[in-house]
Image (tube, coloured by chain):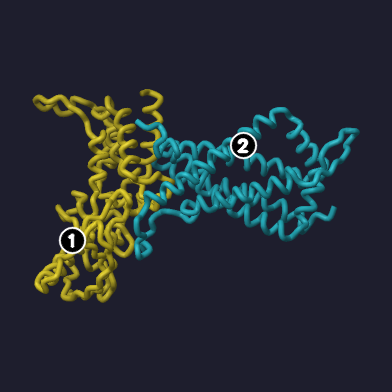
Amino acid sequence: MSHQYHLKIWRQKNSQSEGKFENYSIDNIHSDMTLLEMLDVLNQQLAIKGEDPVSFDHDCREGICGSCSLVINGNPHGPDSGTTSCQIFMRKFPNGSQLVIEPFRAKAFPLIKDLVVNRSAFDRIIASGGYVSVDTGSSVDANATPISKIAAEMAMDSAACIGCGACVAACRNGSAMLFVGAKVSHLALLPQGDPERSRRVQNMMTQMDDEGFGSCTNMGSCAGACPKDISLDNIARLNQEYMRSLLKG
Amino acid sequence: MKYMNSIAYKWIMALTGWAWALFVMTHMIGNMLIFSGAKAYNTYSHFLVSNPLIYIAEAGLVLTILGHSFTGLFLFFKNRYCSKPLTYSVKPTRNKGASFSSQSMAYTGSFMLAFLITHLITFKYGTLYMVKYEDKEMRDIFRLVVEVFHNPNYVIWYIISLFFVGVHLSHGVSSGFQSLGLIHGKSRNIIKIIGYFYAIIVALGFMAQPIFMYFFYRG
């Protein structure tokens, strides 16, 4: 099925210049195309016309890398819950409908160009403690460290965070607590993460505040927008982890 | 490491908020004595204000409300600064889970603070009537309440204010559990429902008093 759409896309040359919406009409879009493929088609047409193509972030296009962003009709990662922008198919949008496509907006995510924002603040938060220091050497035996099924499942749920930043984009405060919560929870729930857990939560929280993210006010928009359905329990666990770190040191 | 990070602010908001949530609940229950008549109400009031512990309680309430208000306002402005350089041009079509009450906490809170000040002026520092029960002289606060609650303007203002108290509590009480990390998995919905009930009980309990006074009490 071939569809036609009216696109309203945010265009901005660079972080200094003023951006504005541009309108584009596009037809011959197959309903089984993904949203990003539709943007590829648009960019091809723009390139042929000698215009500047629309810049947007993408990489794996299978919903696991966290590169794609986009706010589609007001929703970070589009209208479906638990879906990244790259996994949205055009059949979701009725023929002839309007799609408003904007970048993620937050103070800590400065815009680079068009729909691309700089999310390196997340990398610096991870670098401040979102890892496990290990001794190098030959790999350890499987199951050498026993982990309960429940802990493994909960850690896996937290580890599902792909660090895309939709939580920040959806948050009215521009807070990154869901992201930090997921990263802290993932490692705090596992024995491998235990030795560094106090240092980790303290450093990551400091880094989050220093990067200019807002404070969480428990509204829950982040969990609603998360393409990986990271739950608010991760923020509750983060709050508890911080208290634990102060008590236990 | 900074101690005053986003989580520390959450705890301040949660603990001071809970202190006031407990206070308004006890205040509402105590005030229900209004239905038992002037003597019971005045004796209860006298018992409270003549108790030396009242000063500790009042100091605690002043400190917690100041902590809650200032931290809340600081976070409100900080978060506005950290938020969006530009707002989105379209409102989200998908339910994002953020309730009206959770988004309006700063506004309902500021309103409540204004209400609290007028409330103290009206009652605590209002007209001083005296009454004598068995040779014991005490303040006739009941008479003042009757007077005030027969003024339709005040009754309307009071009920509107209590509505906002309810809206504020409906997010605040359950939000405190989240802030202190006391929510895990399935307990989330139960705690949310408890928060709603808490807010409804406090708001309706308080509202019942001026409504009863205005429509039914002809003492």
Q: CA distance from mark 2 to mark 1?
A: 55 Å
> Residue farthest to the right?
B135
Rendering colour (chain B): cyan
Q: Which chain is yellow?
A: A
Q: Which residue is mark 1?
A: A55
Residue at 32% x, 28% y: name it.
A198
Q: Secondary structure at mark 1?
A: loop
Residue at 43% x, 53% y: name it.
B98
Place of residue A127 in the rendered image (x, y in percent of width and height, measured from the top left): 23, 36
Residue at 40% x, 45% y: name it.
A216
Residue B61 numbered tag? 2
Q: Chain of mark 2?
A: B
Residues packed near mark 1 inside 10 Å, few (<14), some (14 to 19) or many (20 plus) = some
Q: Residue A25's image quarter?
A: bottom left
Residue A192 placement, left or right of B101: left
Residue A157 placement, left or right of A142: right
Regarding residue B58, the answer to whether it shows in the image is: yes
Regarding residue A87, the answer to whether it shows in the image is: no
Q: Quadrant of the C terminus of chain A?
A: top left
Place of residue A39 in the rendered image (x, y in percent of width and height, measured from the top left): 18, 65
Nearer-the-camera pick, B32 or A180: A180
